[in-house]
Image (spheres, rainbow, N blue to C red):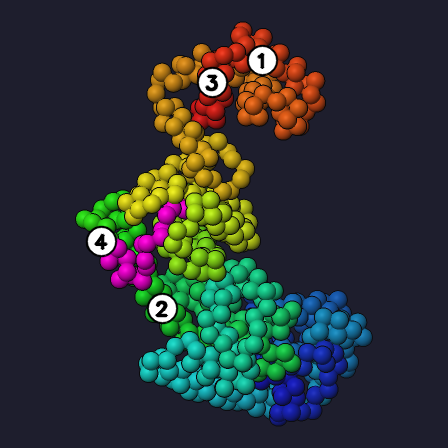
Amino acid sequence: MGITVAQALKIGGLSQGRVLAGVQNLDNVIEYVNIVEARCEPYWMIEKALFLTTFYAVRDDVQAQVCTIEMLAERQCAALVFQKGVLSNLAPAVIQRADEVGLPLIEIPQSAQYPEILGPLTGAILQEKAFLLQRSQEIHRRLTGLILSGGGLTEIASALSALIQHPVAITDAWGGVMAATDFDHVSDALVDTLAGTPKVKGEWHSEPLWDAAQRVWLTPVLAGPQETVDGFVVVRDTAGQLDRLDLTAVEQAATIAALEIAKQKSVQEAERRLKRDFVEDLLSGAYHSVEAISARARSLGWELLHKRTVMVVDLNKFEQYYLAHREWGEERFQQVKEWLLHATSQVVSEHNPLGILVNRSDSVILLPHFEQETPPSMARREIEGLAEAICQRTQEQLDELSITVAIGGLCDSVEGLRDSYREAKAALNVARKIARHRPIVWYNDVALYVLLDRLATEPETRHWFEHNLGPLVEYDENKGTELVRTLETYFDVNQMQQQAAHQLGIHLNTLKYRLRRIEEILGTDPFLGDRQLSFYLATKLAHLL
């Protein structure tokens, strides 16, 4: 809140001034006026200040004058006014440097009196601040009145657009439009910008941020006790016409939008809690009858009919990620979880809008919906497509993190959902242990691993494993070879040598050599009769032990 250098040149004694340099930045805003006749110190309040000087302290040192110019420009000084007298003229090097760094440098004659400059400028700045404060209060009262009278984000966007005569959109933290007026299209590039911005208050300036690439002003909406970024007020300003009063209105709108979003979040959190409790009871079997749990689902707007499986979307190694970046603060990690829920919700709303979705700790639980009489084969294809869409959408923003989508078996009843959930969790657990490269894991595909994982805790199982495969594991560890993997792959492809060599990425002769070494190290032929089953199971158990 202040006046521009160009406006200041028309006020009082500064009207006698002559611009020597920095004419391109005469729109710099002046909020303070001061006199400086000592060497400038970095701790001074310099940003948006206009300084008057005769350069007395550095009158004999042109290099010191140049350094003063550079420091003022770097600290975003609004302008420097030089009064002739101590120096009859500034050195060309000083003027040239001021022009290079874009600092408005104004010369006034020796006859100009400081009070003729300071008094009118200070008065103009105070008057401007008082005017902006008054208008800010009026805008605040108007927007607050909208909320108190039952209006929402749509009314806020409409009122702001009418005030500043520019298109306005209010988005969530990830770029999804919640309300808009005359804002015809939010480009993918803008969505990417909003989704990728920091979501913590300390990483944002309080003023609107200008995005030159998109030609928009972005103002964060800070809602909730942690004041994390929960949305943005976006104003399209193609011609760069917004002035300080307009931006004040935008800031006020962001404040009021924060109140509305905080209210919506409170309602949403209450709904989330009810839905989480319901899904918890459903999947744990804590209900009296199918009729009772179905009626409870309908009260939440859900229908349990045609829900035939449970999917768990889980953040991989989130605990290690948290410990490695603990200095980021709890809010940042909460935003990661929110992003997982947001991205999954988007995919479900697009591909399976009747599905049931809740968040739970580091995971999202999904019960997809199927049309009546959907054959199992078609249901599996639909689930696979849904899982792939979730993986693709979430990976766009997770950076270091990845997800696993675990899917339980298909069931034919509401009671069966509990078993499907247990299977999805079991599949997720073994997927972490066997280090699968594919992010989608079906229980039916890893059921053998689930069974072996339960057996792995028994002492007899480890003894059996070491008796069968111990020598080969020890050889691999000592020599850095991959004979256990070779044996497993050979079993997986039904002992077809050409196919096994291809999957291992080795020559056929190398495979044959490895198979001979496996027999020599084990002291027996693992491909003979019933031994095949024992050694095949042992290679699978190796992943878990």
Q: CA distance from mark 4 to mark 3?
A: 46 Å
Which amino acid does the dot numbered 1 rest on?
Answer: Ile
Point out the tag, 4 or 3, that comes first from the N-terminus.
4
Q: Which residues are magenta?
A: 294-313
Which amino acid does the dot numbered 4 rest on?
Answer: Glu
Q: Is residue 427 left or right of residue 40?
A: left
Task: Return the residue found at the far top.
Answer: 523
Of residues 217 and 315, the one nearer the viewer is 315
**Kind of element beneath mark 2:** helix
Residue of label 1: 518
Point out the tag, 1 or 4, that comes first from the N-terminus.
4
- Which of the 4 image quarters holds residue 242? bottom right
**Kind of element beneath mark 1:** helix
Residue of label 3: 533
Disc 3 crowd rating (10 Å Cα; few below 14, some 14-19, many 20+) is few
Point out the tag, 2 or 1, that comes first from the N-terminus.
2
